[in-house]
Structures are given as structure tokens and as C-alpha cells.
């Protein structure tokens, strides 16, 4: 039964500030939980994509005619909007974490593959010659000369993939796994709770920056020879 | 930075062509019109009746629910949904949750929602306060020793608050409780049925019955939920048995679909029920969730049961802030809201 | 769990039903709406970004800002922006256009900046030697030379905006995203799948068409250069 007398909205609502520390302190636990889910799925996706894309990139450089089809296939997938991709994967895979993870991997593939290929291509031919001259086999040249030289480009690709993945995870809310996106959506539904939406959005950007920084530092650590010059 | 501008036009062109050809082949086999089952979303003229004069929307801050005097809406009383295995091994869980059901009524629910949605307090705080005030702590604090229960809720405030209340009551009986916000029904229901991650969820009688019905019998299945609470609960129990779900007692508290206009509009045209609206006004603009054009409780039901005449439908959200804002701004005449919305004032 | 074997069949039935396309509010209407929203957003973004990018590129200042802006917006979650706009009182198609334009601005800005910046210094010198004014150099020398990258930027922006529009359906916006939202709401997962396919197809189609347009509109002299040129660093 609907309420017996005519209900009406009460005009005096509590103020709805765009940001509130109270919100953050009261909801720290759930914010942290969602942020962890968010970070973990991003890292997992980029790791899987790298595990696929870097070897594919090495392959594409050795077997030249593969490069163009591989790059265009991943480019086509990259053009598909995230909502559409999740909408396609979820009915087939069930909703929740799996379609989001797969979608993230697909998007990260292009970026990492493209950067791996261009990085490997951009290695100084003189360095390759010198290595050959020293008697190194083709695989050894690949692993000991070309790969290290391509590292800056690969790391740049990993950074780009990570940052875009962090933003993409939020779209996963439509298929039941959106990390901080869940909190954004909740804030939207719960009477436009501005502080909630804003906090989740800022947390998302912050997470992207932190992960980017970590990868940048890791990249610097792996390429000590570049530290002297402006990389 | 130049990598941002990489152009691999020729490569991409090569890939797009097969994609376009593939899509064309997919559609080459044209099916019969209407085979997808979708009807025209355009509102139809109600046969026979002369349509009443068009009433324009009237912007106003205050909203008023029009009474569903023809009982179009299904009952959506709160009911605890429990994984069947847990219900069997720990029947006290259901007894405890039933005490929560008994303590809630629609006005109380509105009050709880107002505390969270309008006063911006946390579900945790509000739930704690409610459990203490209503004296819902268990009499036997060791009944649940050694058993862990995971409560899940949907991602909106009311569900989270209810789930937290359930959690506190079970905790006071010694259970080891976790409460998690999961997502929408498609996300948490399989987990509830499975029972490994979630064993208790606060649910709504009518909506869940129809959800299970469609899951079992297809999206076009005949509706089995109705405005008769007992009949619907019986249907729900049967559907639940087939799926692996057990239920507690339905609460007097309800959160069901309701249709609202602005207070100024209601006063201007002197309407308090949906039947009166149908008599007084035509050419209405309806606002609701995208699926409203199809749901029997929504546009089709309003047209068939009440003979309401709609000039336009605006796809917004289900009882959410978009629909309420659209009503307040005078963009729509009639909007779908929820009867336990915190913004509605309680009966004096 | 919903039966998944029938989902693909449902999607195909949905797509093959002519009524799905032709009914009022059906696929054709939604596609028109989608394209209109895309055009509006790109137009707004272009009006804002192209002049600024061109001037920055010409004067050579602001490289740091441009780079930072691009990186920052890549990290910004689209849904967050859409919900924030809604919470600020802007929803429906207006919010869709604003949010989409917001994300298109950095793309157009960067590409215009790079395009103008990359104009051959010798051409710029020659123009200055001829006594051309700043605006003249910009309009008659740098912009024509920048068409390749500006064109690439417009293409990326259009596809990106077309991809952003469906998200706004979650906040009351229009376009093909409505099909996905409808399917989710009525538990018709075949429709969700069909909606996803339609959105993807539209974006791929736009990308392909613009690629062709870009190829034919780039002056021949620049075509060879653009094809081999900017890859990565």
C-alpha cells in the first residue's frame, strides 16, 4: 500500500558539497577495498597483455609480414568502445570480473604491441651489426641487444596501457565489476551524492598517477645506461 | 609524444573492409518484421475513449505520489532471501531476520533512507541506531557461534542499509558476519544461489519473483507477481525452491514502483489518484527507466489499466535522481519513483 | 545464470528483424541521434581546441601544458565526468555532448599543436622573409602543412566521441547506448550483445570512412610524407 496521506518531498535537504573529508573518513574501508580491486585488475590485465604482446612484438620483428596484420587486428579491437566491448563479452562470458579483465587485456594489447614493435625497429643498426660481428646468434642479438634498447619504448607503452586501463575499469560497472566506478555509480544513484562521486573520481585519477609513477621508476631502474642523458 | 599521433591508416583500412563485409553478410538474411518481439515504443491511442485535454507539466520542488487505486503495481515488500543450504543448517538465521522484517514498515524505511540520502549519514551509523532503538539485538548471544554468514546488497543506499541491519542483528547472536555491496541483481543473485561468497540478501517480493520467473521461463514469460502479497510470496517460494533459495517472512515495509507528479501539478488539476489523472489529463510526458516502455507495471500497464494517454516517453532512470529532477524541472509530467524514497515525507 | 547458448541467436534475431531498425526509436533513429551528438561534440571541441592549438604551435609555447593536459585527461574516467555533470544539474543529451567534447579537446589540441609545430622551419622562414604577418603565416603556411596531423586528430576525436556517447545512456543520454541499457533492464542479453555490436560497428565504420577521407583530402605532396612519418618515439 502506498503511504496513506499524500506524501511530498521535504524541501530542506542537507547541503551537498562537492567534496567532504567526513565522507572520506567514514567510508575509508569501502574506498580502500574498491581501490584495491581496481588496482589489482589493472595490474593483472596489463601483465597479461604484456605477456602476450611483447613476445608477439618480438615475433613480428622477426617475421616481417606478420607485423601489419597483427597491428591492424589489435587496432580494430582498440577502436571498439569499451561499453560495447563489455556489452559483447558479458552475455557470452557471464557478468563480473572475467569480461572486464578480458576487455582490458584486449585494449592494452594494441598499445603494448605497437610500442614493442616500434621500439625494436628503432634500435640502432650499428649496434646490431656490432653484436653480430661479435658472433652473437640472431636470438641472442634479439634478447641482449634489441630488447634492452627497446625498453624505453616498451615501458612507455606499459605506462600508457596502465593509465588508460585504470580509466576503463570504471566502465565495468555496467557488467558488475567496476572498482571505483561502483562507488561513482552509487553516488550518482544515491541522490547525486557529489562528495561520493568526486572522491571516487579523484581516487581513480590518483591511482592512475601512482601506477604511472611506479612504472616510470621501474623503467628508469631497468635502463641505468640512459640515466646520464635526457632519455 | 609523437606516438600518440601514429597513423597506420593503410593497415586499418585493410581491416575495416572485411569487418563491414562481415556485418553486411550478418544482416543479409532479413528476418520477419517483429520477430525480435519488440513492440513499437510509441504510445498508442487508447481505443474508444476521447483523450482528455493535454496537461502540461508544472515545475515544482515538491513531489507527490498518485495513488495506484487500480492496483497495477506488484507488491514489493522487503523479504530476506537466504541461500537454501544455510537456511537448512542454521534455521535461526531466518528467525532472526524475520524479527527485522517485523520491525520495519514503510514509514520507518523512508526515515532510514532519508537519513542516508538526504542527511548524508552512513548506512552503518543508521543501521546501528535502528537496531538499538527497535531492540533487535538477539536474546541469545551465542546462537550463531562458529558460523560465518556473508550478507550481500545491491549498490543503492536502501539495500546497503537493510543488509547492514541484517548484519548487526546476526552479529549480536554471535555469528561471524561480513556485509558487502555487490552490484545489481544480475551480479549478486548467482552468487547467492551458489552460496560460497554470499548467503543472505535483502530482497523485494514482486521484483524478485518476476526476475526468477524470467530467468526460468524466458524474457517474455507471463507475469506471476501481482498486487496480492500472499499469492506472490507463494509463487516466489516455489521459484525459490527450484533455484536453491529460501525466504523469511515478508515485511510490512514496501519499496515499490510509484508514479509521481509535482505538488503544483496535483493541486492545479485536483488529482490524487492515477484514475483521476487519466480522467483529467491527456498528452502526458512519462519519465522512467529505458525498459519502462515494455514493463507491464510501467507504460503498457498505465495505458491498459488506467487508460492514461502519453504523448512522449523520456528514458531516464528507475526512480533515481534523474527522474526526480526531470519532474521538478517540469520536463516530464509523470515519473516513476520508489515509494520508500527518502525524499518523500512520511504520513503525519 | 542466464542461459548463454541462446544469447548469440537472440542477438542475430534482434538485428535481422527489420522492425528493430525502422520502428520509431529504433536503430536508425538512435543512430541518427548518435551521429548528431557526435557531430555536436566534435564541433564544440574543434571550435575550442583548433585555434588554441594552432596559436600555441605557432608561437612554440605551451608544450609542457599540452603534454600534461593529454596525460591528465587519459587518466580521467569518462563515467566519473558524466556522473559529476549530472550531479551538477546537467544531464541528458546536453551532458553527453559536454562530456564527449571535454575528452575530444586534448586530442584535437595536441594534434593541431604538433601539426603546426612540425611545419618545416624553412617554409616558415621563407614566409617571414616575404614579410607575412603572424596570422598570415599561421593561416597560409603552417595550417595547410598541418592538415595531415589535424586530419588525424579529427578522425581520432570523432571515433573517440562516438565511443563516449553510449556511456551517457547510463545517465539519460540518447544514442545507440540506449539499446544496451534497455537490454540490461529487461534481462534480454541478446539485445545487450546486439547493442554492443551496433555501437562497435558504427565506430569502425566512422573510422574507416574518415581514413578514406583523410587519404583523399591530404594534398598529394604531403601524402607520402605523412604515410611514412610519425610513428613512435
Image (cartoon, rainbow, N blue to C red):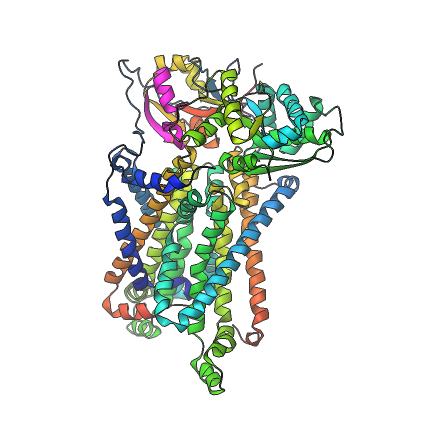
Answer left or right for B282 relative to B74. left
Q: Which residues are magenta?
A: B290-314
Figure quadrant of the N terminus of chain B: bottom left
Figure quadrant of the C terminus of chain B: top right
Vertical placement of residue B124 versus B77, above or below:
below
| Residue B145 position within the rendered picture, expressed as x and y whole percent measured from the top left | 74, 33
Answer left or right for C66 relative to A23. left
Vertical placement of residue A100 versus C92, above or below:
below
| Residue C10 position within the rendered picture, expressed as x and y whole percent measured from the top left | 35, 38
- The residue drawn where x is 51% and y is 66% is A155
Question: How many tags in the picture?
Answer: 0
The magenta stretch spans residue C68: no
Pick the front one: B230 or B284: B230
Vertical placement of residue A47 versus C88, above or below:
below
Q: Is residue B285 visible?
A: yes
Pick the front one: A182 or B245: B245
* Quadrant of residue A13 within the rendered picture: top right
- The residue drawn where x is 29% and y is 61% is B14
The magenta stretch spans residue B312: yes
* Quadrant of residue C93 within the rendered picture: top left
Amino acid at each position: 500500500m502506498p503511504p496513506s496521506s499524500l506524501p511530498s518531498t521535504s524541501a530542506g535537504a542537507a547541503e551537498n558539497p562537492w567534496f567532504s573529508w567526513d565522507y572520506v573518513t567514514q567510508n575509508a574501508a569501502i574506498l580502500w577495498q574498491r581501490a584495491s580491486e581496481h588496482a589489482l585488475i589493472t595490474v593483472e590485465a596489463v601483465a597479461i597483455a604484456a605477456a602476450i604482446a611483447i613476445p608477439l612484438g618480438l615475433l613480428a620483428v622477426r617475421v616481417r609480414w606478420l607485423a601489419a596484420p597483427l597491428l591492424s587486428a589489435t587496432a580494430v579491437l582498440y577502436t571498439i568502445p569499451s561499453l560495447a566491448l563489455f556489452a559483447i563479452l558479458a552475455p557470452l562470458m557471464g557478468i563480473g570480473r572475467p569480461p572486464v579483465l578480458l576487455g582490458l587485456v584486449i585494449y592494452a594489447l594494441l598499445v603494448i604491441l605497437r610500442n614493442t614493435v616500434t621500439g625494436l625497429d628503432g634500435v640502432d643498426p650499428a649496434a646490431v651489426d656490432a653484436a653480430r660481428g661479435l658472433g652473437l646468434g640472431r636470438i641472442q642479438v634479439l634478447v641482449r641487444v634489441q630488447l634492452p634498447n627497446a625498453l624505453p619504448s616498451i615501458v612507455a607503452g606499459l605506462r600508457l596501457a596502465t593509465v588508460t586501463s585504470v580509466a576503463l575499469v570504471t566502465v565495468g560497472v555496467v557488467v558488475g565489476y567496476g572498482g571505483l566506478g561502483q562507488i561513482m555509480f552509487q553516488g550518482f544513484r544515491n541522490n547525486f551524492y557529489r562528495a561520493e562521486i568526486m572522491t571516487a573520481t579523484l581516487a581513480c585519477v590518483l591511482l592512475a598517477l601512482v601506477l604511472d609513477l611506479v612504472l616510470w621508476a621501474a623503467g628508469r631502474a631497468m635502463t641505468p645506461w640512459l640515466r646520464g642523458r635526457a632519455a | 609524444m609523437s606516438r600518440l599521433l601514429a597513423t597506420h591508416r593503410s593497415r586499418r583500412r585493410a581491416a575495416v573492409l572485411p569487418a563491414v563485409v562481415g556485418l553486411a553478410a550478418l544482416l543479409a538474411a532479413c528476418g520477419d518484421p517483429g520477430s525480435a518481439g519488440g513492440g513499437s515504443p510509441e504510445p498508442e491511442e487508447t481505443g474508444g475513449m476521447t483523450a482528455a485535454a493535454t496537461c502540461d507539466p508544472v515545475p515544482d520542488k515538491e513531489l507527490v505520489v498518485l495513488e495506484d487505486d487500480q492496483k497495477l503495481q506488484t507488491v514489493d515488500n522487503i523479504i530476506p532471501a537466504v541461500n537454501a543450504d544455510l537456511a537448512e543448517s542454521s534455521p535461526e538465521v531466518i528467525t532472526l531476520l524475520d524479527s527485522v522484517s517485523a520491525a520495519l514498515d514503510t514509514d520507518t524505511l523512508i526515515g532510514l533512507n532519508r537519513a542516508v540520502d538526504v542527511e548524508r549519514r552512513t548506512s552503518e551509523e543508521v543501521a546501528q541506531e535502528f537496531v538499538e532503538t527497535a531492540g533487535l539485538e538477539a536474546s541469545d548471544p551465542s546462537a550463531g557461534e562458529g558460523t560465518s554468514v556473508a550478507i550481500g546488497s545491491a549498490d543503492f543506499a536502501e539495500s546497503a542499509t537493510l543488509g547492514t541491519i541484517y548484519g548487526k542483528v546476526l552479529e549480536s547472536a554471535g555469528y561471524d558476519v561480513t556485509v558487502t555491496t555487490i552490484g545489481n541483481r544480475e551480479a549478486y543473485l548467482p552468487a547467492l544461489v551458489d552460496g560460497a561468497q554470499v548467503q543472505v540478501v535483502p530482497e523485494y517480493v514482486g521484483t524478485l519473483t518476476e526476475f526468477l520467473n524470467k530467468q526460468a521461463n524466458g524474457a517474455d514469460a507471463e507475469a506471476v507477481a501481482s498486487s496480492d502479497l500472499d499469492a506472490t510470496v507463494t509463487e516466489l517460494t516455489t521459484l525459490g525452491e527450484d533455484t536453491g533459495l529460501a525466504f523469511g517472512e515478508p515485511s510490512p515495509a514496501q519499496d515499490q514502483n510509484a508514479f509521481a507528479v509535482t505538488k503544483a501539478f496535483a493541486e492545479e488539476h485536483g488529482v490524487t489518484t492515477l484514475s483521476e489523472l487519466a480522467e483529467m489529463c491527456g498528452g502526458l510526458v512519462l519519465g522512467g527507466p529505458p525498459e519502462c516502455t515494455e514493463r507491464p507495471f510501467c507504460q503498457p500497464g498505465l495505458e491498459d489499466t488506467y487508460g492514461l494517454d502519453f504523448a512522449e516517453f523520456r528514458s531516464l532512470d528507475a526512480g533515481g535522481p534523474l527522474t526526480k529532477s526531470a519532474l521538478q524541472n517540469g520536463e516530464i509530467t509523470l515519473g516513476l519513483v520508489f515509494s520508500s524514497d527518502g525524499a518523500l515525507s512520511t504520513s503525519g | 545464470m542466464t542461459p548463454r547458448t541462446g544469447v548469440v541467436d537472440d542477438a542475430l534475431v534482434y538485428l535481422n528483424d527489420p522492425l528493430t531498425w525502422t520502428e520509431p526509436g529504433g536503430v536508425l533513429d538512435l543512430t541518427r541521434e548518435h551521429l548528431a551528438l557526435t557531430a555536436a561534440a566534435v564541433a564544440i571541441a574543434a571550435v575550442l581546441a583548433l585555434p588554441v592549438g594552432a596559436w600555441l604551435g605557432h608561437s612554440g609555447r605551451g608544450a609542457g601544458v599540452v603534454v600534461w593536459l593529454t596525460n591528465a585527461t587519459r587518466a580521467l574516467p569518462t563515467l566519473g565526468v558524466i556522473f559529476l555533470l549530472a550531479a551538477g544539474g546537467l544531464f541528458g543529451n546536453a551532458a553527453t555532448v559536454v562530456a564527449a567534447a571535454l575528452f575530444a579537446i586534448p586530442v584535437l589540441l595536441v594534434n593541431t599543436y604538433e601539426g603546426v609545430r612540425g611545419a618545416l622551419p624553412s617554409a616558415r622562414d621563407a614566409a617571414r622573409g616575404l614579410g607575412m604577418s603572424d596570422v598570415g603565416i599561421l593561416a597560409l603556411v603552417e595550417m595547410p602543412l598541418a592538415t595531415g596531423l589535424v586530419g588525424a586528430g579529427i578522425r581520432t576525436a570523432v571515433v573517440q566521441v562516438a565511443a563516449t556517447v553510449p556511456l551517457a545512456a547510463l545517465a539519460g543520454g540518447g544514442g545507440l547506448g540506449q539499446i544496451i541499457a534497455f537490454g540490461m533492464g529487461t534481462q534480454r542479453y541478446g539485445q545487450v550483445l546486439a547493442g554492443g555490436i551496433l555501437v562497435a560497428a558504427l565506430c569502425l565504420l566512422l573510422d574507416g570512412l574518415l581514413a578514406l577521407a583523410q587519404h583523399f583530402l591530404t594534398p598529394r605532396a604531403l601524402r607520402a610524407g605523412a604515410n611514412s612519418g610519425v610513428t613512435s618515439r
